[in-house]
Amino acid sequence: MPKYMYSPSRNLFYDADLERGYSDSGIWPSDAIEVSETTFLSFTGLPPEGKRRLSDNDGLPCWGDLPGLTQQEQVAIAEAQRQELINQANDYINRKQWPYKLALNRLSENEKREFNIWIDYLDALGDVDTSLSPDINWPVLPND
């Protein structure tokens, strides 16, 4: 039966049968402690959602919460979301061919009204202050 070792400083498991090879290479952790196969199996593979493997106060593996996103990461996500919404709106406008029809003075009154609503939506997206992420009030997508 294999023996498993856990290093709290490295947060890694080791096969005890390979200790000599690790030691000869100078990479066997000095804080390795023996753990049961149950512990090894419980803390390898995919962690539960929203968790990561940590070491507890006794030097044993435990599940802890993933850290939250930094403000900078939240802003980057919001900026990417805004750009995606702008791209989707522009795609919709271009599929309707409103810019071309406008240039040729071929927009109906109803199309002008719809086009203006979508332009207002694009303006509202451009005005979104992503530095307020995650507390952003996104503009409402116009109805088709």
Image (cartoon, rainbow, N blue to C red):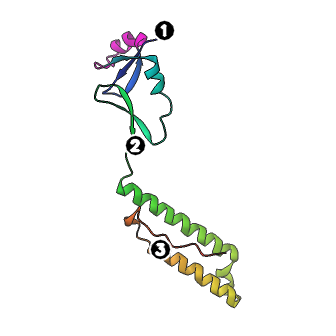
Name the residue: 65% across, 87% down.
Answer: 112
Where does the image place residue 135, in percent across and percent down from the top left?
41, 65
Where does the image place residue 134, in percent across and percent down from the top left?
41, 61
The circle drawn on residue 66 is 2
- Residues rendered magenta in the picture: 16-31
Q: In the image, which is nearer the foreground, mark 3 or mark 1?
A: 1
Where does the image place residue 55, in percent across and percent down from the top left?
33, 30
Tell me which numbered mark, 2 or 3, is placed earlier along the sequence: 2
- The quadrant holding residue 59 is top left
Q: Is residue 40 above or below residue 51?
A: above
The circle drawn on residue 126 is 3
Q: Which residue is mark 1?
A: 1
Name the residue: 63% across, 70% down.
Answer: 91
Locate the C terminus and report the quarter of the image it occupies. bottom right
Categorize mark 3 by other alpha carbons within 10 Å: few (<14), some (14-19), many (20+).
few
- Marks 1 and 2, how far apart in space? 33 Å
Q: Is residue 94 above or below residue 46?
A: below
Name the residue: 32% across, 26% down.
Answer: 8
Tell me which numbered mark, 3 or 1, is placed earlier along the sequence: 1
Categorize mark 1 by other alpha carbons within 10 Å: few (<14), some (14-19), many (20+).
few
